[in-house]
Amino acid sequence: MEKIRRSPMFYVGDKYKLIEEIKQYFPKNINTFIEPFVGGGTVFLNVEAKRYILNDIDENIYNLHIFLQQKANEINFINEVLTYIKKYNLSRSFLEDVVPKELKREYKKTYYAKYNKQGYDKLKQDFNKLQNKNYLLLYLLLIYGFNRMIRFNSKGEFNVPVGNVDFNKNVLQALGDYFEFVENKDIKFENLDFKDFIIKNGFKDGDFMYLDPPYLITFSEYNKIWNEEKEHELLIFLDNLHQRNIKFAISNVTHYKGRVNNIFIDWMSKYNVKKIKSNYISYHDNSAKQIEEVLVINYD
Ligand SMILES: C[S@@+](CC[C@H](N)C(=O)[O-])C[C@H]1O[C@@H](n2cnc3c(N)ncnc32)[C@H](O)[C@@H]1O
């Protein structure tokens, strides 16, 4: 079994659980692997190619990738992180258990949130005071924050509350895997709208593009910046790539809790549609039957 890497950003809606299923449809030899909507990067981290050109419109995501890419070559990174973890007195189960037994007894399921709240709030305050964003601090806010989200208010202040999470062995593993993968590889990140990104990079035969845009009919922070007009634009771009013989694969959700994405359904009938067992299945609300995720490819 091939090892699956998860992005150390633990990004909302990442493809960690689906990567094996999706990847089986990718071409075997890829020159340049292109992702206009890279998010946390869990997909590219599991694809072998000669070069990678990766993009996201979210400035923070882009900068976190640039930050991690730089840190891949620094052996002292984890020590640097640990200095801050200790400075803000945050839990660190990857190394030692510092949460008092009494707290664990009293707050059986929420002790990390209780333990980390004070330090996290101080970290957030210090981060928000800085003139320029410090990406190590932002990364720590993400790791200890609610749902591992990145969210800023209209004043530009990071405003996610503490989560019931910790810097644990999975985080350490994901960071190590990311560093190992990106080190000495030809990987370029960009921070553009997908249209500008695709036009600017003018792809060639032998290149392969994987797209995981926001889904028109589901709900998450980044869906707020997506709409029917963008969806149409994207699909026209893909038809254009097809005419130029560039292979692509695009993920999408066609049905979601009574909502249907007819724009995508009409468009995909021209191509090769693979059904994917969805990420969104929730056993609590019994909505499994109402959700359909697909991967559409323009090759056999
Ligand atoms: C579904 S997520 C991608 C998740 C990714 N596959 C992963 O495994 O982490 C969609 C991404 O598209 C980005 N995005 C939204 N609108 C965009 C646009 N117009 N151009 C480029 N990226 C955009 C969002 O910031 C978000 O990171």
Image (tube, rainbow, N blue to C red):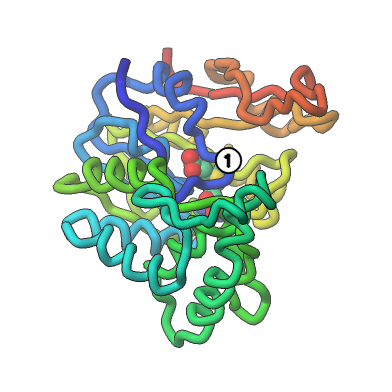
Q: Position of residue 255 (x, y in %)?
A: 75, 27
Question: Could one spot residue 234 in this view of the protein?
Answer: no
In this rendering, the answer to whether 159 lies above or below 26 is below
**In this orientation, which residue lies closer to the viewer: 209 or 257?**
257
Q: Position of residue 253 (x, y in %)?
A: 66, 30
**In this orientation, which residue lies closer to the viewer: 141 or 253?**
141
Q: Position of residue 178 (x, y in %)?
A: 30, 45
The residue indicated by pointer 1 is 13
Residue at position x 16%, y 57% from top?
75
Q: Position of residue 216 (x, y in %)?
A: 70, 42
Residue at position x 43%, y 77% from top?
133
Is the CB atom of the residue marked by disc 1 within 8 angstroms of ligand 1's nearest atom? yes
Question: Could one spot residue 297 in this view of the protein?
Answer: yes
Q: Quadrant of residue 265?
A: top right
Q: Quadrant location of the N terminus?
A: top left
**In this orientation, which residue lies closer to the viewer: 230 or 24?**
24
In this rendering, the answer to whether 16 lies above or below 154 is above
Number of labelled discs? 1
Residue at position x 32%, y 61% from top?
66
- Lateral position of residue 127 relative to residue 177, left or right: right
Q: Quadrant location of the C terminus?
A: top left
Dot 1 falls on a residue whose secondary structure is: loop
Q: Residue furthest right?
A: 258
